[in-house]
Image: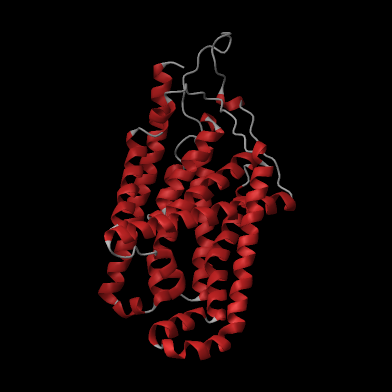
Amino acid sequence: MNQESLKQIRKHFSKIGLIYFLGTLLIIAVQTASGWLVLRFAPSMLENNDLALIISMIPMYVIAMPVLILLIRTVPTTPPVTFPDASSPDSGSHSPYTAPVSTKKMTVGQWIVAFMICFAGMYISNIIGTVITQLIGMAKGGMVNNDILNVVSSTGLLTTIAIIVIIAPVMEEILFRKLLIDRIVSCGEGTAVLISGLLFGLFHGNLNQFAYAFVLGLLFGFIYVKTRNIRYTILMHMVVNFMGSVLSMIVLRASGYEELVRIMNDQPEALTNHMMEALPGMMILMVYAFMLIGVTIAGIVLFFVNLRKFACYPGAVVVPKGKRFTTFLLNPGMLLFILFWTIKIILQLFE
């Protein structure tokens, strides 16, 4: 591949990164503006946790992300590479428009296996992210806020389901799987999966969520490049978010765990008497915990059983080894996006 072709590919990736960076700025702008308007004209609305979440998130999903979708759709799905003469025996590449596209369908059984692998990856990476975050908190002499946990634990069930379980998975899968991967997969499935996971993880804006969002982004990206059906990952994303936010909160509240913690802190002398009353709830919590552990162990086993199937094929546009990192990531647009979110994550750790 000649230098002009590499330059064209680099510009292609830079334009994609720049659009996602501008989308980030737009998201921040609309969230800031909506928050200011409410604070200016109806500050009492922010006293309600559900309304506060809606005011913060809906402008992003209704205004900023649709604009981002329109912008990213202006980018061609294949970089405008100048290819050598196809008749040349040593041309080393062929037209990206003739590259085979995988459109395999998933059976219900395959979807369940894939979901268990994804859940195991999320569970383990979440533990790792939590441990690292807590270690950083200990080192700085204070706790690091877990924003998503604070949001889920303080909002109503219907609001959480509407925003976190339904709207977020649909918009995020369209942006970070379908639209993104369709525009970079011609440079290789592995490249598309890695960049999809990286941008998706960084977009969450904190270290704890980055850890599991990055892993989920890799797994969801792999499923999408192999099926080219966004419905599979949207549904999987919805179920993961439901189990991680809604179901876990339902179980915690039903178990009486929050009340038990309150008594431990405020009335430790009454803890023994309360333990008998809380026993049924604790049993529910234990059953749920064992279920999560069981799904995680099964997912780990299934991952290694199916390890050989995790093969990513090169794209029609083949960038030479040694040039890929600089071409795909070390370009102005991608660097702006990556640096912005990296700095945001670091700042969040030391708030």
How far across and how far down the image is residue 106, in percent? 71, 47
Number of on-image labels:
0
User: Where 35 falls versus 49 (above or below)?
Assistant: above
Q: Is residue 234 visible?
A: no
**Residue 219 locus on image (x, y percent):** 57, 46
Q: Nearer the viewer, residue 199 or 91?
A: 199
Position above or below: 25 against 181: below
Query: Is 28 situated above or below 225?
Result: below
Asked if residue 346 can be seen in this view, the reply is yes
Q: What residue do we see at 50% from left, 34% from top?
A: 191
The image position of residue 6, as x and y in percent, is 41, 22
Task: Name the residue rendered at 61%, 70% in the picture.
Answer: 288
Q: Residue at x 33, y 38 (%)?
A: 335
Report the residue at 32% width, 57% height from top. Answer: 349
Q: Is residue 123 left or right of residue 30?
A: right
Image spot of residue 216 (x, y percent): 53, 50
